[in-house]
Image (tube, helix red, strand yellow):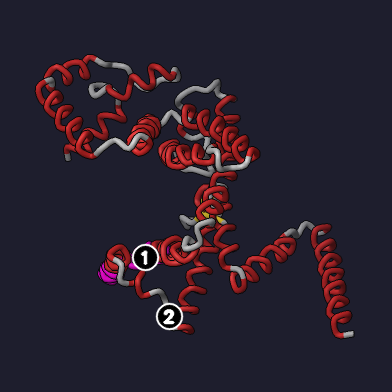
Amino acid sequence: MLQLLKSYWIYIFSFIFIAINSILIANEFYYLAVLPFILAIIFMAFFNLDKLMWFIVLTTPLSLNIEELEIGGIGMYLPTEPLMFGVMLLFFLKLIYEKNYDAAIIKHPVTIAILFNLSWIFISSLTSEMPIISIKFLLARLWFVVCFYFIGIQLFKIKNNYKIFFWAYVIPLSFVIIYAVIRLAGYNFEEKPAHWVMQPFFKDHTSYGAILAMYFPLLFLFTGKSYPTYQKVFSILLIGIFTVGLILSYTRAALVSVLAAFIMFLIYKYKIKFSLLITIMVTSGIILLLSWNTIIMNLERNNQDSSDKLAEHVESISNVSTDASNLERLNRWNS
């Protein structure tokens, strides 16, 4: 009887919610419809924190900056950062209540370096000319560190969670790539619009290209023999999408990074000995020093700026005389 009453209450509350929400929608008030999602998130926070973390990862590529939406001067991404703030509060409450965390992690040099960094940010915030902004910066750093370091370490103790994290991020990221490519197609795949077509999901093509370059090599891992056919086919499809995204991001550093990653893969794949690598590096260094003046002269002759054409765009990587982006990097390194 008690179980029957409980099920009746569920039906009653559901009916009341649907009725009230229908009336509000008819009067152009839509915010109550968000309530079930908020309740689901609260439930996950208390009873399935790992699932809430996967939800945060899933929504990260699709999150939107409040500043870009022009609904306030707060540089915060929705819905990820408010969720991360909530997860951080829960983590601290649990820490106070249980007074227990893995001692090996706390004593690790990386943890000590992170805690020192956070402590120094806090001390410098007290003497800041704009303490509110400094405290906000500290809070933002805290919720990232808590979610993706202290909680992340606990999650990744389970080996399979690496795959969950990867797919939770890559799948929505592939939709962002498709969105950016479709928008760029409207501008005839020109180089200039490629700097901003990924907005509002990414600020510019450099951060967008960097993320693509980070995840692109890992997709090849899931085309191995040990994975089922459907996963191989899906991975190959995503490799195609990411390849198009990388090329059309017009981010030269990302293309060079992928090439470097491929060279590292060959080194690991064929187990090239460290002594041979050192020999190659030393020999290359000597040849570079002996040919330095000739190399510089050839580089200075290259006046090819970044272009819509892939071959010309790649050629512009070595332009150190007229390309604005390359000159900016050289000036920064020189400084």
Residue type, label 2: Asn
Q: Which residue is drawn at 26% across and 33% down?
A: 328
On the picture, is 197 further left or further right than 304? right
Question: Which dot, 2 or 1, sits closer to the camera?
Answer: 2
Q: Of callouts 2 and 1, which one flags the residue occurring earlier in the amino acid sequence?
A: 2
The residue labelled by disc 2 is 100
Magenta stretch bounds: 118-140
Where is the N terminus found, in terms of image quarters? bottom right
The location of residue 129, given as percent across then percent down, is: 28, 65
Circle 1 Cα neighbour tier, 10 Å, few/some/many (<14 / 14–19 / ≥20):
some
On the picture, is 248 further left or further right than 229? left
User: Is residue 305 visible in the rendered structure shown here?
Assistant: yes
Magenta-colored stretch includes residue 123 = yes
SS for tag 1?
Answer: helix
The residue labelled by disc 1 is 138
Residue 7 is drawn in which quadrant?
Answer: bottom right
Please tell me whether the stretch drawn in magenta is mainly helix, strand or loop: helix
Circle 2 Cα neighbour tier, 10 Å, few/some/many (<14 / 14–19 / ≥20):
few
